[in-house]
Image: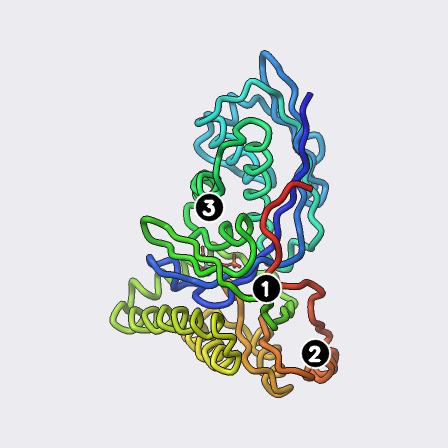
Amino acid sequence: MVAVTVSAPAKLFILGEHAVVYDGQAIVTAVDARLSVTIRAEQADRPQLSIDALDVGLQNWQRDITTVAQQGQFEGESRFIESCVARFHQFHPLDHSLYIRTQSHFARDLGLGSSSATVAATLFALAQLFAPNLSLADIFDMGLDAIRAVQKLGSGADLAAALYGGTLYYINREPRHVYPLEIDELPMVAVYSGQKAGTVSYVQQVRVLRDTYPQVIDPIIQSMLEIVDSGRQAIQGQNWQALGTLMNVQHGLLHALGVDTAALSEVIFLARQAQALGAKLSGAGGGDCAIVLHASGMEKRLRAALHKIGRDILPYGLHADGVRID
Ligand code: PMV
């Protein structure tokens, strides 16, 4: 019997969501809200996969690994783990039964990337046990395939954040690149909008809009990508004033793409009234979180304003560690 416990961080998009899908680039940061995965493995003639993921209501879920590996489609709460095991088995055939237990230290409703953290942690744990020479880049490639096998889309930016940690400039074109941004801190906080959103439907909605009005939407996407590049320079130069301005413009463009909501906008306008340097929605939109670039001394004002609408700053730091053995 061999065993390992690892954890991966949650993530937030700083700039470039949606635009990154179209062979673009984005800036993402790892969030210090972690998801743990423990894998125990035991040699077996007919290897089984067992999963306990109590956060999502899975208890003693079991299937033959050969059956999992042959599946073309993955559904239900076990889907991301199954897809990881299938992918891993393809390159490193498993002759062990796996008992996998996950535990999330953040609520899945927040939209902080529990799927990408699950994929990062599961594949990293499998690599520790059965393929210790795999690099993070190898694990990233496998993970992106595993995510796409489940949801048919995904830029991989969230997975990069979960694996590498820190704050990253991520390029979603072949060959994919991940550039860590060398900073000590990212003076931002996240605020949940109170609504849970599904990424896939919003990505599809934006794609339909782009297909219908390419002459209108393509320039918006181009501007969003320009903002990502300018934002990278602003972050590297710790020019927070400039970053705040760019975040505000990016939010306006996301609004133009139709993914903003009244609840997100309310948080964002309150933050700006509280003299935030910038505020925008983070991720696919339709709900989930807003991020706020704070000016020194504004936190009390922001909290007071948010309390009036029943919201609060999430208690998680950004620019956190990537996947690690615990
Ligand atoms: O909703 P989230 O936080 O999973 O972010 C989705 C970001 C998109 O750019 C819209 C999609 C993607 O795969 O990058």
> Which quadrant does the N terminus fall into?
top right
Name which of mark 2 and mark 3 comes first in the sequence: 3
Disc 2 residue type (three-letter)? Leu
Name which of mark 1 and mark 3 comes first in the sequence: 3
Name which of mark 2 and mark 1 comes first in the sequence: 1
Check contact, mark 2 vs mark 3: CB within 8 A: no
Q: How many marks?
A: 3
Mark nearest the camera among 2 and 3 is 2
Percent x, y of residue 214: 27, 67
Q: Secondary structure at mark 1?
A: loop
Which residue occupies the foreground of this view, 294 or 270? 294
Q: Secondary structure at mark 2?
A: helix
Residue annotated with mark 2: 306
Label at residue 288: 1
Residue at the extreme left: 215
Q: Is residue 64 left or right of residue 234?
A: right
Ligand 1 within 8 Å of the CB at mark 1 = yes
Disc 1 residue type (three-letter)? Asp
Q: Is residue 258 left or right of residue 304?
A: left
Eyeballing the image, is 213 above or below 61?
below
Q: Dot 3 surroundings within 10 Å: few (below 14), some, or many (20 or more)? A: some
Percent x, y of residue 242: 47, 81
Percent x, y of residue 294: 62, 78
Residue annotated with mark 3: 151
